[in-house]
Image (cartoon, rainbow, N blue to C red):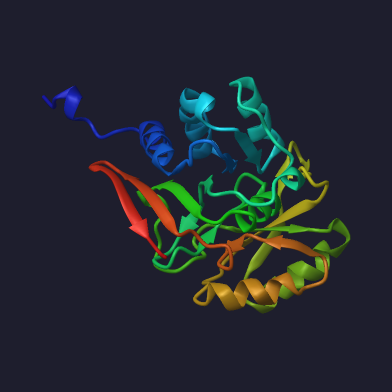
Amino acid sequence: MSDPASAAPTQDELKALVGRAALDYVVRGEIVGVGTGSTVNKFIEALATIRNEIKGAVSSSVASTERLRALGIEVFDSNAVDELAVYIDGADEIDGRGHMIKGGGAALTREKIVAAQSRRFVCIADASKRVEVLGAFPLPVEIIPMAARRLMRQFAALGGLAQVREKDGLPLVTDNGQHILDVTGLKIADPLAFESEVNQWPGVVTVGVFAHQKAQVCLLATPEGVQTLRYD
């Protein structure tokens, strides 16, 4: 019979592990940038244990803002802060250079804004998110709704199948009042060039490739512990 104590950690336990590890990158006495998603929720729980050592947070979504405030952490408007020392967020995929796909939680535009405002991006993820080439995870793209049909054709020309993300049978509406296309079938070998190209398409608000705002550090949860990957 196997020893229960030796069982592999659950996905939830791995997320909690990197959430706590990310506290080492929080600059005490400053405002921290906080992302969105289930792994970040574990970081927010950990952050609450040192809330008296930071000024507060800038958040990338309504959901994270509500969670931070519920735990007694002050949330600042991004326009009230010139620069953040660090932004801590998850990823749907991350490659060997720190380029990511993000947006599974529909907060990619605000995530990219806060990332651009920060001197350092620390990605927290589990080992399943590490890939050689971006594209296995559906690529989220926040769009102006009236452009959906044309943008779907543009992605089809690149070999991708784009579908409008739905919630309860209707198009999902982001915190910014827009819709999201999820694109499958792509292999993004040159994330920098791909991000630059798609950003120019009329109707695209934000493409979920984070290459220009890439991670400098990734804390990767593995059954053996947290692996630190650096891309500076």
Q: Quadrant of residue 145?
A: bottom right
Q: How many marks?
A: 0
The location of residue 42, given as percent across then percent down, is 48, 32
The location of residue 221, given as percent across then percent down, is 34, 44
> Farthest residue in the left direction?
1
Residue drawn at (47%, 51%), measured in percent from left and top?
122
Q: Quadrant of residue 207?
A: bottom right
The front one of 227 and 152 is 227
The location of residue 13, given as percent across then percent down, is 36, 31
Query: Is 107 placed above or below 53 here?
Result: below
Q: Along the horizontal axis of the image, is 176 left or right of 84? A: right
Q: Along the horizontal axis of the image, is 1 left or right of 87? A: left
Residue drawn at (69%, 72%), measured in percent from left and top?
198
> From where the camera sits, is residue 159 visible?
no
> Farthest residue in the right direction?
146
Query: Is 61 placed above or below 179 here?
Result: above
Q: Along the horizontal axis of the image, is 164 left or right of 125? A: right
Instruction: Name the quarter where the N terminus is drawn.
Output: top left
> From where the camera sits, is residue 37 visible?
yes
Q: Quadrant of residue 117?
A: bottom right
The front one of 206 and 156 is 206
The front one of 86 and 66 is 86
The front one of 37 and 8 is 37
Residue drawn at (42%, 65%), measured in percent from left and top?
232
